Amino acid sequence: MRIIGGSSETTMRKRNLIGITISALIIHIIAPLLLENTELYFFTMPLPWTTTPLQLFNPNSTFYMSRLPLWGLAGITTALIFYLCMCVIVILGTLLFGRRWQCSTLCLFNGFAAEVFAPAFPLVGKTGRLKPSTIKVFSKLRWIFLNIALFFTFYWALFLLGIPLPGDIEMIGKIETYKYLGTELLMAMFFWVAFMGRGYCYYCPLGTILGILAKAAGQKIAMDNGQCIQCNQCNLTCPMSIDIKEKAESGEAVTELRCVGCGHCVDVCPTRTLSYSTKFLDVIVNHNKDKGLSI
């Protein structure tokens, strides 16, 4: 496979696989063994992906009471510290390296499946870009799922602050669990296995938040490295169906919110016209150029 074969044309994909492999080893093997907690996976994704960590702050929640006999108070404290550390790592990393930091390097949910099993997709139908009408549907779903996730996040945050709220808190927790299992996990698996690798990335609530942070970080696919020959390879390889070719033709950078920073378009470009960048990475590049270093 080209991804593993040592070709300089797959630099970004190699970095994705290295990051995801290291992340998987730490999250699924090393950290659970050291902390004696096999459920740390649910504490690796910041809000608003899940309110599980917030529920663990409440000694009266069903989740807290079910985990106390298994983990003990020290185990619960350790899980929360681990979660806070992960939040800092993801947020700071995104502000420096863009959405690529989480979505294509650390994410063990859709990011892992999309990068590791990319050669096998799709199992049903042919590889192709999504239609504009389908993308519009996903765009609406993105904001719907974000608002739902924010509702649960703010509900639990206000509850922890002692503010009286309507509704049964246990029922709210169950509804969120059913929402997660039914409309996110199962649907994501459906898209992974059957039709595409990045289906869930179109409407992942955390991905939307990180996309906004990535814009603040100046994430972009720059077009200043060469001359675009309109071969369309970038469009064909983009897992998020972004029209990169049109931007490249006019020399305009891609700053699309749904860009996960995978860098597939950068790798496949035959003229090396494209490059992935953020404000921080630009500083690094310019610093190396001033010192005459290669990157």
Image (spheres, grey):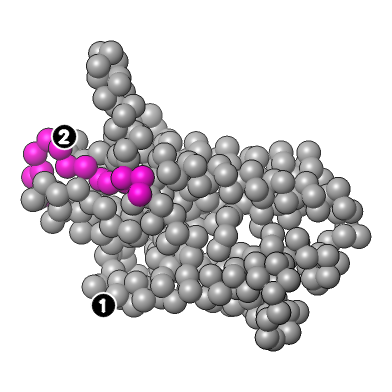
Dot 1 amino acid type: Ser
Dot 2 amino acid type: Asn
Could you give the CA–CA distance between mark 1 and mark 2, rounded to whole angstroms? 32 Å
The answer to which of 183 and 189 lies nearer the viewer is 183
Q: Quadrant of residue 142?
A: bottom left
Q: Which mark is residue 202?
A: none
Q: Quadrant of residue 242?
A: bottom left
Who's the residue at 83% across and 70% down the image?
Answer: 60
x and y percentages locating residue 28 in the rendered image: 68, 46
x and y percentages locating residue 76 in the rendered image: 81, 53
Name the quarter where the N terminus is drawn: top left
Q: Which residues are magenta?
A: 216-231
The answer to which of 166 and 274 lies nearer the viewer is 166
Who's the residue at 79% across and 43% down the image?
Answer: 35
Circles 1, 2 touching at the beta carbon (< 8 Å) = no
Position of residue 219 relative to residue 141, above or below, is above
x and y percentages locating residue 103 in the rendered image: 46, 51
Q: Give the class, few, some or many, for how many residues have Cα within 10 Å of label 2's Cα (few <14, many ≥20).
A: few
Who's the residue at 28% across and 13% down the image?
Answer: 291
Q: Is residue 110 left or right of residue 255?
A: right
Helix, strand or loop at mark 1 = helix
7 within the magenta span: no
Who's the residue at 44% across and 45% down the image?
Answer: 94
Q: Which residue is mark 1?
A: 133
222 within the magenta span: yes
x and y percentages locating residue 98 in the rendered image: 39, 45
Q: Earlier in the sequence, mark 1 or mark 2?
A: 1
Q: Which residue is mark 2?
A: 225
